[in-house]
Image: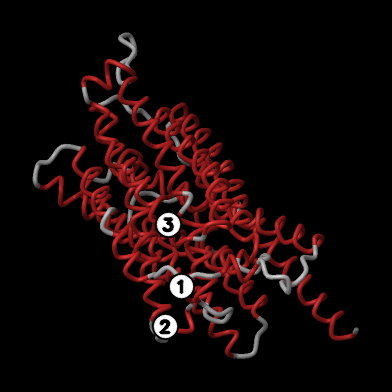
Amino acid sequence: MTAARGPSWKWWVCAALLLATMLNYMDRQTLSLTATQLKTEIHLDDGRYGHLERWFSYAFATGGIFFGFIADRVGPRRLYPFVLVGWSIAGLASPLAINPRVLEMFASPDDPGSGEFRWLFLCRTVLGFFEAGHWPCALLTARNVLSAEQRPLGNSILQSGASLGALLTPLVIQAIRATGAPWQAPFLIIGAIGMLWVPMWFALVRRNDLHYVRVEKAKDAPPIHVGRVLFQLVVLVTIVVTISLAWQFQRAWLPKYLKEYHHYSEATANYFTSGYYIVADLGCLFFGGVVTVLTWRSIHVRWARLVSFTLCTALIALSALVPLLDRGPILLICLVAVGAGALGAHPQYYALVQDLPARHMGVLSGLLAATSWFAVGYMQGAMGDYIQENKSYDLPLVVTGLAPVAGLVAMAAWAAFGLKHATATRAA
């Protein structure tokens, strides 16, 4: 049990969650950072790239439901390394796209690049399915080892792994490119690094450390108020879909946007992408800290989250101004501000998820993730087709930048509902 551990143990667990999130994003980002090179080497045009992102998202949605259901029953200790090995293998397999046997099985002679595309399609689908298992495992672990007051900071640490992974990936790829290695090398190196996380996890988390399944199924577990939970789910769906549209569009398309639309060099775009994620990481930690500071000042946690989310939404909305800007420093500053807001909004969402009934949190968080990833998948495919046809990123930037306003309205409704419910409870 966690009570038998020292006070620093829970934060070491949070560090392990950060590393898992980092690896999750490194495997995910490798394709987006090599997509411009693959456009000429294996005919991976914008339409095909958009469809890879679409089906990655659909697989992620399916995996979220599946692994959320499993996590509620077996717990994260055994499931976590299983899903991490699964997505690492998918990354390691991606370079087989140019293997002659693969091409013989998958290629159409009259369609250049079809074999490579279909193999990458398979690998990205498997990658998305297994990567989805990271989130129910991470959220359940954080909920189990952290108190309610510690979760905003713990969630910020967990989520900051996303920007850390996205920050490191361009630097790793740039370093690999400098050696003259082919495009396959980053997939192999990053996939192999992921395997090293598994022994560390088992050394840190022992067999009896995570007992949440037995505890939450006890007979004295609090009753579930169905109407309140349904309202909470509607709020959470609205929030996660809108912030995911903003974050995932930039995650998938930003390198291509800089290289192909504004004609930045590959090295400049890669270094800027790393800087973008440094700022996003700082934004994630900052907006998690905003909630902590406000609650110290006796502001109710719901209103503190709402203030933090409002600031994030304002930064994300700057994306709607990006189409009006020419290449230069102001454009880049706007883009990094959008990234800070988009990533900073996620810890507030995770804190709301962790308020769901704990005995069903795995499957409910999986359903929420599935909803957002189905929406993201549809968006990625549609945006790929739009960009391919119009050679413009303007509409996608505006739509994804303004979408979180709907999430802000939903969070405000939930905060008002909580205040009304608390007032009624005190009056009774």
Question: Which secondary structure lies at badge 1?
Answer: loop
**Mark 2 or 3, nearer chain start:** 2
Residue 332, x across and y down, in percent? 36, 57
**Toward the viewer: 161 or 229?**
229
| Apparent side of residue 92 relative to residue 240 in the rendered image (left or right) | left
Based on the displayed image, in which of its 4 quarters is residue 422 positioned?
bottom right
Is residue 128 placed above or below 7 in the rendered structure? above
Instruction: From the top left corner, tell me how far across and down residue 94 is, in percent.
Output: 29, 35
Rounded to the nearest whole Å, what is the CA distance between mark 1 and mark 2? 9 Å
Kindly report the distance in space between the C-alpha atoms of the residues bearing marks 2 and 3.
21 Å
Give percent across and percent down for residue 193.
24, 54
Q: Which residue is mark 2?
A: 5
Residue located 33% across and 28% down the image: 44
Residue type at the position of mark 2: Arg
| Residue with the mark numbered 1 | 209
Name the disc covering residue 80, or none: 3
- Measure the C-alpha gap from mark 1 to mark 3: 14 Å
Badge 2 local density, few (<14 within 10 Å), some, or many (20+)?
few
Residue, x 66% and y 53% (percent of image)?
Answer: 237
